[in-house]
Image: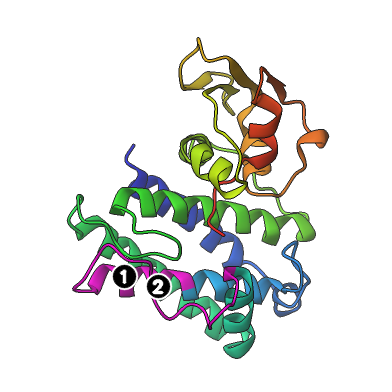
Amino acid sequence: MHVFDDLSAEQDRLETILASLSSEAWETVSAAAGWTIADVVLHLAQTEEGVVMSASADDQGRPLEGWRLENETLDAAIDRQVRAERAAPPVVFERWRAARRTALAALRTADPDRRLRWAQAPLKPATLATTRLAEHWAHGLDITEPLGIAFPDTARLRHVAWLGYATLPYAFALADQAFGDVYCELVAPDGSTWRFGDPAAPSSIRGPAGEFCRVGARRRHPAHTTLVAAGPVGSTALGLLRNYAV
């Protein structure tokens, strides 16, 4: 299934969960530090609106503007924007519902070869959709875990796992470390195997795909997983693994 369809399915799942929440649940502290569940959904709405803005921009090839003040980190900018636009849960929910549908339509109809401006670097529509799927999944964990709501892993995690693997060179560069080839062999939720990279690579990471994706989302520390890293840069790669921008 195409990533656009999987993004829609992931958002549909989250919308169903959010529609069932009480007013009190919306104000519950989420697993995202400093944010309530309403704050998390507001952030998702704001970033989906950013997708729409990027897809409609006439230019391309530059990071998305207007996200940060001078010398402000991306995390700080995101938190500032959430704090500035907090609203009642029904308002936040409807804002996200509208934004996510408009954003998905924009990605589906965008020129597939045109790079759209984004927070760190311009991305092609399919890649941007992959990052949006990864973010909605990770924040879905932030929403459901504090409330004890089931949020099982699905085959859609293949996109998230691929993103973590594909951005390893970027993660190494951010850490100012020399990159080495890494092979990833991951057990999918249905028990099948997902493979990324060359099996002959000198370093490897093996284990459950769900754990791999949670490490990449910084929702779990590698030491608290059953993932096995081997080779000269395997452990380093697992420590630097990420499926989001900074």
Locate residue 198, reporting x and y percent. 46, 16
Residue that sits furthest to the top in the current view: 200
Residue visible at 61% across and 30% down in the picture: 209
Quick check: marks 2 and 1 in contact, CB under 8 Å?
Answer: yes
Magenta-drawn stretch contains 60: yes
Residue visible at 69% across and 49% down in the picture: 218
Q: Secondary structure at mark 2?
A: helix
Locate residue 73, reporting x and y percent. 60, 71
- Is residue 203 visible in the rendered image? The answer is yes
Predominant secondary structure in magenta? loop
Q: Magenta segment, which residues? A: 47-74
- Which label was assigned to residue 157? none
Q: Marks 2/1: CA distance?
A: 6 Å
Residue that sits furthest to the right in the current view: 224
On screen, residue 62 above or below 217: below
Q: What amino acid type is highlighted by mark number 2? A: Gly
Left or right, 188 with reference to 35:
left
Residue visible at 77% across and 60% down in the picture: 147
On screen, residue 189 above or below 199: below
Magenta-drawn stretch contains 178: no
Left or right, 163 with reference to 78:
left
Q: Mark 1 highlights which residue?
A: 54
- Which label was assigned to residue 50? 2
Considering depth in this image, is 162 or 67 the residue closer to the camera?
67
Is disc 1 surrounded by few (<14), some (14 to 19) or many (20+) residues within 10 Å?
many
Considering depth in this image, is 151 or 167 the residue closer to the camera?
167
Locate residue 98, reporting x and y percent. 39, 75
Name which quarter of the figure residue 140 lies in. bottom right
Name which quarter of the figure residue 97 lies in. bottom left
Considering depth in this image, is 219 or 37 the residue closer to the camera?
219
